[in-house]
Amino acid sequence: MKAEFVIQFLPRMMQERGHGDNYTVAYRDVVVGANKRVKIDAANMFFFFVEGFSADVVITSETGIYDLRSEHINEQQHEHTGEIVIENSSEEILHLEFIVAIIKNS
């Protein structure tokens, strides 16, 4: 998924989900150490994975899985929400870029 697509897609997606303009947009560069796991509490947020694609990355959340090595999923999920777990199985530090839509409290 490309950042440009996310930025263009967000207004429509948020409208369709009943949030209207009641959100802000942020950029997150998540650093995941070699052979490490990062957990993110993304309640009331939508994380869109836009850069840092690697077969060494597995992202799981309430909305799905991103895992290029898996033979058991037929679609790579780039949108994540709820509790997000990011795993790096490589010996290198990875930088993963996300566009984040954060729902404002009413």
Image (cartoon, rainbow, N blue to C red):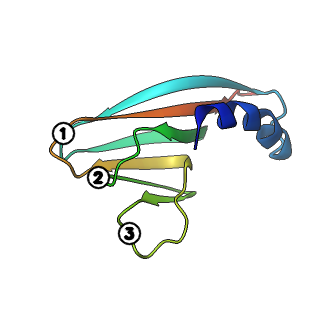
CB of mark 1 within 8 Å of CB of mark 2? yes
User: Which secondary structure lies at badge 1?
Assistant: loop
Q: Nearer the viewer, residue 20 or 13?
A: 13
Question: Sequence order check: which comes first, mark 3 or mark 2?
Answer: 2
Q: Amino acid at mark 3?
A: Ser
Q: Is residue 104 left or right of residue 40?
A: right
Q: Which residue is mark 2?
A: 56
Residue at 15% of width from left, 44% of height from top? 91
Q: Is residue 13 left or right of residue 27?
A: right
In the picture, measured across the screen, residue 57 lies left or right of residue 44, that is left
| Figure check: 46 above or below 59 | above
Q: What residue lies at 18% left-to-right and 41% top-to-bottom? A: 34
Q: What amino acid is at disc 1?
A: Glu
In the displayed structure, does residue 87 sit left or right of residue 52? left
Q: Amino acid at mark 2?
A: Asp
Dot 3: element: loop
Structural crowding at the residue carrying mark 2, measured as other residues with C-alpha within 10 Å and reported as few (<14), some (14–19) or many (≥20): some
- Does dot 2 land on a helix, a strand or a loop? loop
Marks 1/2: CA distance?
9 Å
Which residue sits at x=57%, y=40%? Answer: 48
**Residue 97, how many percent across, how many down?**
45, 32
Q: CA distance from mark 3 to mark 2?
A: 11 Å
Q: Which mark, residue 70?
A: 3
The picture places residue 4, in percent across and down from the top left corner, at 65, 31
Crowd class of label 3 (few under 14; some 14 to 19; many from 20; radius 10 Å): few
Q: Which residue is mark 1?
A: 92
Task: Assign the N terminus to one quadrant of the image.
Answer: top right
Considering every residue shown, the one lying at the far left of the view is 91
Q: Disc 1 or 3, which lies upstream in sequence?
A: 3
Q: Residues within 10 Å of mark 1 (few under 14, many from 20)?
A: few
